[in-house]
Amino acid sequence: MGTTTRGGPQVMRRSRVREGLPFPLGATWDGLGVNFALFSASATKVELCLFDETGEQELERIELPEYTDEVWHGYVPDARPGTIYAYRVHGPYEPEAGHRFNANKLLLDPYAKGLVGEIRWNPAHFGYKMETGDDLTFDERDSGPYMPKCRVVDSAYTWGQDRKPAIPWDRTIFYETHVKGFTRLHPAVPEALRGTYAGLTTPEVVDYIRSLGVTSVELLPIHAFVQDSHLVEKGLANYWGYNTIGFFAPELRYAATRTERRGAASEFKEMVARLHAANLEVILDVVYNHTAEGNEKGPTLSFKGIDNNSYYRLMPDEKRYYINETGTGNTVNLSHPRVLQMVTDSLRYWAQEMHVDGFRFDLATILAREPYGFDEGGGFLDSCRQDPVLSSVKLIAEPWDCGPGGYQVGGFAPGWAEWNDKYRDTVRAFWKGEDGKLAEFAKRLTGSGDVFDRRGRRPWASVNFITAHDGFCLTDLVSYNEKHNEANGENNNDGHSHNLSWNCGVEGPTDDPEVCALRERQKRNLLATLLVSQGTPLILAGDELGRTQKGNNNTYCQDNELNWINWEGITDADHELIEFTRKLVALRNTLPILRRARFFTGEYNEELDVRDARWLTPSGDDMGEAQWNDPTARCFGLLLDGRAQATGIRRPGADATALIVMNAHYDVVEFRLPEIAGGNIWHCLLDTNVVGNPEVERFGSGDTYLVTGRSVLLFALEPEGEASVALRRATRALLRLNEQSAPVPSQPAEPQGQGGQGETVAEAAFAAGKEDGGSGEKTE
């Protein structure tokens, strides 16, 4: 197809632009004016369009005068923070050569730090004549009236005493949630703030999160994203937000102060500062693998019209078409140095300017894929590894995509943590009661060393999760055998069918007391497994209080009560589950043996005369090959010896020895408590068959404990001759939790200042340590 260059609608121009600089990219306010810089390797002209404060009326159009190192730039001395702008980019419209320039299309700045307005879908958004279905045609309609616009942002913000919590990896517990869904129905949040960044700073909200003992709030995508046209037509919405159009701009829908000159940025910063003041980290779920522009039939909103051939991976021999390794239509081309720069600039911006503590990368395999395939030494991973800013924040990969060689669990470089779906699937299958899962389950419980124990990586590299935003929530996992996604409008064809769930005998809601009791115990079993496993646990927000999605395992398009946490619907059973979760976190915090920085191997250390881990049969004997290979075996014990070497220094450890007993059998199993050197009294700190926080019971070595069918136990050994510091701290922390329950809306309490409601799990653990005359941070 021949080269076509055509201009958009004309407006009055006035020459008041200076040369400016090619860096930094984006719109940068220097106190006197604004420098505009836009990368495009193949454009022939770039026009800066300025709008009134509403973004509705285009006031003038200024041609950027300079082109340096493939960057178009100019300086506008009259521009200020709050100036509304966008671009029109001229160049060849040659889809078969990978070029899709069309100056009739108003384009968002890839580096925009604030947006105003929302997209209003119209055929004018498409670079071709959409009605024809032929992307080789050229569309001359102006998309400007239907587009959001960019806003110049003043980055000045008074952070005061803000400091990043810098939670060590071995103490990290992620809490995955959604800005809107967490507070949209919260009665203590003012109506105007519900579902916003500001809503998450409400004292009652912060107090509740702190009370759980989690350390790091992981937010589903908050980068500016687009509502998919096909969902809008169905009356649905993109709730999760995995449809990014701006990698520097906070999503405007989550801002309570949308008309502020600095847009949503300052409100987001305030949220981060308030969470930091409560010693909570902020982790962002980020989507750098694709954009909202889709494939060759998709709209032209930004990157496609600025430099399609650079920003996207195109078919090598047919550049009209996009490589689709994301399942969304396009794949961001991180092999291009300017695109790689954009992504790393974005990450540094959020880490430095917005004080974010880490990132969870959606479909992260794509970011490490070069044209020849996945490479853990690829450009993006190398950039992160050597960057002094990015190498100091938490980096978490979702290590898979739908491209060739896309499954890379364990394949990322040292320094990265990875979502471990092997853990999720194995734990689900074990508690569902599937045969032959014991050996696999043992690996997952001890940090998945078979996957991550290489090149000095630590157990924390395995991010253990049983539920997440994608799939069944915890209540549904024990209430449904099948997905029920009819509300999504796809005849229940969307979402995974292989959920490894078990409804405990009845599909969906039931009043049967036996089924309800079993479901509650199964929820406790799953949470207990998560928090006694080596690795980094991730809890899905709402799981601890019985939230249900009514069997929908793909709620990406449900911006309604199906996803929003129903705070006023919390039942007595839900309160019990909240307190049980707090108990688990307290035990994990006070027993370092549950979160060691070294992998347990089960090997005998002759010098120290100890094995760090032993796997026991119900009779108290070490498991042999016959037991490991028994497909019907469902009950075992894991003995973690606190005397084992805890660091690289060859010396005995001083942790409490712990015994974890798992029984996925349906009936009671008699378990003989083992006899080991150093002590003969076992303290039962946890039994998932027992609701509440009963007094800690003591048992002797050799005693038989009746393990209820489908339950988890945790014992700690009382050493001979001296008290165990960890055991004492654990006991005291549990007593403190009994004195102060979690501050949920149905249990209002007198406010004690910002982030000061009651005593948190971490504070209980810290106080228990102080009572011993030491620091709450000190391990044994």
Image (spheres, helix red, strand yellow):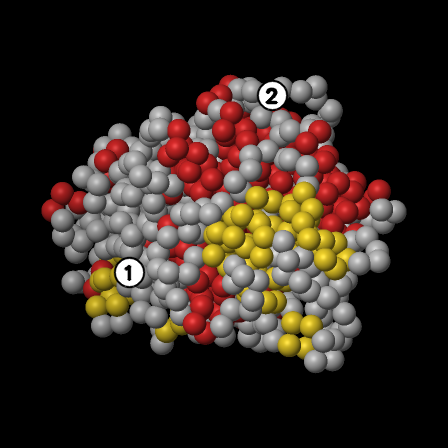
Task: Name the foreground residue: 602 vs 629.
Answer: 629
Residue 324: which disc?
A: 1
Amino acid type indicated by mark 2: Gln
Of the numbered discs 2 and 1, the one sitting upstream in the chain is 1
| Residue name at image x 34 percent, y 51 percent | 500
User: Residue at point 55% right, 34% down?
Assistant: 691
- Looking at this view, name the residue that lies furthest to the left: 132
Q: Which residue is mark 2?
A: 747
Quarter occupied by residue 48: top left
**Residue 525 to residue 336: above or below:** above
- The answer to whether any part of residue 771 appears in the image is yes
Could you tell whether 153 is left or right of 232 in the image? Answer: right
SS state under label 2: loop
SS at mark 1 in the image: loop
Front-lying residue, 747 or 172: 747
Residue at image position (24%, 39%) is 230
Between 748 and 229, which is closer to the camera in this rendering?
A: 748
Q: Residues within 10 Å of mark 2 (few under 14, many from 20)?
A: few
Q: Position of residue 189 (x, y in %)?
A: 56, 22
Disc nearest the viewer among 2 and 1: 2
Question: Disc number at residue 574?
Answer: none
Give the position of the C terminus as an image quadrant. Answer: bottom right
Residue 143 at what x, y percent from top left? 29, 39
Q: CA distance from mark 2 to mark 1?
A: 50 Å
Left or right, 20 with reference to 505: right
Q: Nearer the viewer, residue 283 or 147?
A: 283
Amino acid found under the numbered disc labelled 1:
Asn
